Amino acid sequence: MVWMVRFIVAFIAILSFISSAFGGKVYLSLLTGNPGGTYYPIGNAIAGLINKYVPEVYVIVETGNASVSNCTLVGSGEAEMAFAQNDVVNWAYTGAFIFSKPFANIRVLASLYPEAFHFVTLKSSGIKDIYGLKGKRVAVGEVGSGTEINARLILEEAGLSYKDIDVNYLEYSVAIQRMKEGKIDAFFYTVGYPAVVIEELASTKEISILSLSEDLIKKIGKKYPWLSRHVIPAKTYKWQEENILTISVMALWIGASSIPEDIAYKMVKGCFTHINETYFFHPKMRLITLDTALEGVTTPLHDGAKSFYKEKGLLK
Ligand code: GLU
């Protein structure tokens, strides 16, 4: 996957060079996530708006392993833009936790919508809470995903570790397939709901989405301020009759500091001015608003985005 991304990125760089040499468009990549998640449809919606309203730019949407991998690729100059969770963006920018060096060129263009940690199992599994995972086969997210980082730290704060479970790093569509076949007992996904893969699983199996305890959420929030208490409302998914208590992070739209200021300004403006045209892409589109454009942002904004938010009175 990384090689494919590199190939596409190199291709885009060549296109950019050729087109700028002839006074044409700037080609920018936008790394998203798995097609079964929410980054991908929302990335397509936002790219569509930019491609329509910012004639100088052409955005190319790519699938990928999401947050950690996206921050690494933007941070190392191999991609221009991406979506990533705000906890991961903070660690990437500061070079903390899972990152061994800071990626100081990462800038935030906008905060988009909350992503909830989903702890999914089947009713028939008999698993009732996080402690019920001991000895079970758990898909913890893809390598390079924010989900996997959240899974690790949530287990740790609950006093568990990867040693207590049978860890599987699976792509989400494979995880649900294995779950249908009885080869996986549970899976995690930090994602804006509803997520297509979970809906698909619920269409053939009686799923059970489990809550985290109030105490565990408090403990996690104290140590990791980006992870806040969140409720997945009852009936978000088939079989889910009750509210689910969990944690959430904010999905951020990030870009490299090397994106020219006027281009970043025009992209953010184009996006927020016409966002209502994209509501049909995913229910989370309606949560992408100027009011929440800076929510959960703890690392620097891109200068172009800053100018737009100043103009709108969000910043001084
Ligand atoms: N938040 C997820 C991650 O970074 C990706 C979710 C999505 O693709 O919608 O791992």
Image (cartoon, grey):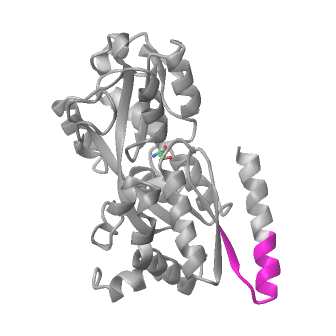
The tally of labels here is 0
Q: Is residue 45 magenta?
A: no
Image x and y of residue 279, in percent: 41, 62
Q: Does 239 sit above or below residue 93?
A: above
Image x and y of residue 258, in percent: 61, 75
Q: Which residues are magenta?
A: 14-28
Whether residue 299 is visible to the viewer of this picture, yes or no, is: no
- Residue 214 figure quarter: top left
Residue drawn 56% across and 68% down? 48
Image x and y of residue 287, in percent: 32, 61
Residue 149 is left or right of residue 21, and the answer is left
Q: Does 186 sit above or below residue 13?
A: above
Image x and y of residue 102, in percent: 52, 57
Name the residue nearer the viewer: 224 or 231: 231
- The image quadrant where one finds the C terminus is bottom left
Residue drawn 36% across and 81% down? 309
Residue 96 is left or right of residue 14, and the answer is left
- The image quadrant where one finds the N terminus is top right
Name the residue nearer the viewer: 29 or 227: 29
